[in-house]
């Protein structure tokens, strides 16, 4: 192990982590960070359990460990900065990885690691500053052991975590370019569009129709569940994805704007599988939203849910879109969803240029009819 230049990345990571600490305004700042440290330590140990249980059937062990160790590092440097600010500059950082034992990850070091984190929490609870510093040093030493055991570079884990946190909380929010900017206009998602959601009831059965003036498009949707929950309005989520992500295979299919001029893009990005993935994401988020009053009164989306969504879309062009855009798309989509549900439908305006999604009570737009008709005719020809 060496100190000096090799330790600078850790101090830089600590400075970067400070910019994404959302607990700073809380009166129990240190306690929240300590709780997060314990939770991430549990996640690291859980990965070992999976690796030992599954053996060769768990090939993603190292990849998972890179993420979990990175998350642990974030809480570690933030907690250290608050309760023992001098300790980060004193820590020893390994300059290389020694190949782990052939029989796989070892349990003893992981259990000692978990116990050391518990000792950190106990020292914080007792407000024993000298003991906190000692316990943090011991936790760090054990972290270097288990990360080496998993063939994980602490520096790589920190860099991966920085990329993830900046994706959620960037210094400046700038939308990624639309994916179809370079395609012919007939293969672009409509930059401005007005869509009317009409709700029709027959007895207790309710369905939603997408309509512009005298033109219907898409399928007549119901909730498809015994306990009605408004999912009949779920096309609004696809429109929100189009506005805030510049991505929606479902909307492309509805508007007949698949990128046919590029057969590879047409098949891989605009095909049936991409549409199924988008519908799956919509359903997964909806399931969580039901538990949270459809995000009413909330200004953020759970980080774990955003990570789950990102995992679902791996391999598709939208995986390049930062997490904050996903969060914006979800929250804005549910804002309009609640308005549609409570108002029994309404007129939704999409603006992909200004990245805006607007709702108004029932109205009919001639411009909407023209836009839908033109995209329909382009698809037919």
Image (spheres, grey):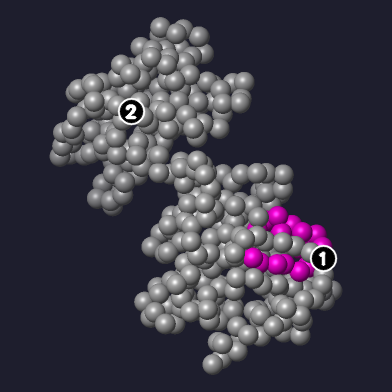
Say whether residue 43 is left or right of residue 343: left
Q: Which residue is mark 2?
A: 10
Q: Residue 58 location, x and y as percent?
A: 30, 49
Farthest residue in the right direction? 203
How far is the residue under mark 2 from the one under mark 1?
53 Å
SS state under label 2: helix
SS state under label 1: loop
Q: Is residue 361 visible?
A: yes
What are the residue bounds of the magenta stretch?
Answer: 333-351
Q: Are marks 2 and 1 in contact (CB under 8 Å)?
A: no
Check disc 1: other Cα within 10 Å, few if <14, some if 14-19, many if 20+: some
Q: Residue 138 location, x and y as percent?
A: 32, 17
Q: Which residue is mark 1?
A: 361
Q: Residue 194 location, x and y as percent?
A: 70, 72
Q: Residue at x 66, y 67 (%)?
A: 350
Say whether residue 325 is left or right of residue 273: right
Say whether residue 94 is left or right of residue 294: left
Check disc 2: other Cα within 10 Å, few if <14, some if 14-19, many if 20+: many
Front-most of residues 256 and 134: 256
Front-most of residues 171 and 379: 171
Q: Residue at x 47, y 46 (%)?
A: 167
User: Is residue 112 shown in magenta?
Assistant: no
């Amino acid at each position: 192990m060496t100190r000096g230049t090799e330790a600078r990345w850790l101090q830089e990571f600590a400075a970067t982590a400070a910019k994404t600490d959302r607990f700073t305004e809380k009166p129990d700042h240190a306690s929240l960070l300590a709780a997060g440290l314990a939770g991430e330590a549990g996640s690291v140990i859980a990965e070992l359990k999976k690796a030992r249980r599954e053996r060769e059937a768990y090939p993603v062990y190292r990849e998972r460990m890179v993420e979990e160790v990175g998350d642990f590092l974030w809480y570690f440097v933030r907690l250290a900065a608050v309760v023992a600010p001098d300790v980060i500059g004193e820590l020893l950082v390994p300059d290389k990885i020694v190949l782990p034992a052939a029989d796989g990850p070892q349990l003893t070091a992981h259990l000692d690691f978990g116990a050391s984190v518990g000792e950190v929490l106990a020292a914080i609870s007792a407000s024993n500053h000298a003991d906190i510093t000692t316990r943090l040093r011991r936790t760090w030493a054990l972290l270097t052991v288990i990360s080496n055991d998993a063939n994980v570079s602490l520096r790589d884990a920190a860099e991966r975590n920085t990329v993830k946190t900046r994706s959620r909380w960037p210094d400046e929010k700038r939308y990624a370019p639309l994916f179809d900017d370079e395609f012919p206009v007939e293969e672009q998602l409509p930059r401005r569009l007005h869509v009317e959601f009409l709700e029709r009831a027959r007895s207790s059965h309710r369905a939603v129709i997408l309509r512009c003036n005298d033109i219907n498009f898409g399928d007549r949707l119901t909730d498809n569940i015994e306990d009605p929950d408004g999912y009949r309005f779920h096309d609004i989520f696809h429109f929100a994805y189009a506005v805030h992500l510049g991505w929606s295979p479902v909307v492309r299919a509805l508007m007949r704007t698949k990128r046919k001029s590029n057969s590879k893009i047409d098949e891989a990005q605009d095909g049936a599988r991409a549409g199924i993935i988008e519908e799956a994401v919509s359903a997964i988020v909806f399931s969580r939203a039901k538990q949270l009053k459809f995000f009413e009164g909330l200004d953020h989306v759970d980080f774990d849910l955003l990570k789950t969504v990102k995992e679902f879309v791996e391999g598709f062009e939208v995986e390049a879109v930062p997490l904050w855009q996903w969060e914006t798309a979800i929250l804005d989509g549910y804002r309009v969803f609640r308005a549609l549900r409570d108002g029994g439908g309404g007129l939704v305006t999409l603006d992909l240029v200004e990245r805006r999604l607007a709702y108004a009570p029932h109205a009919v737009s001639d411009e909407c009819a023209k836009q839908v008709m033109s995209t329909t005719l382009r698809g037919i020809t």
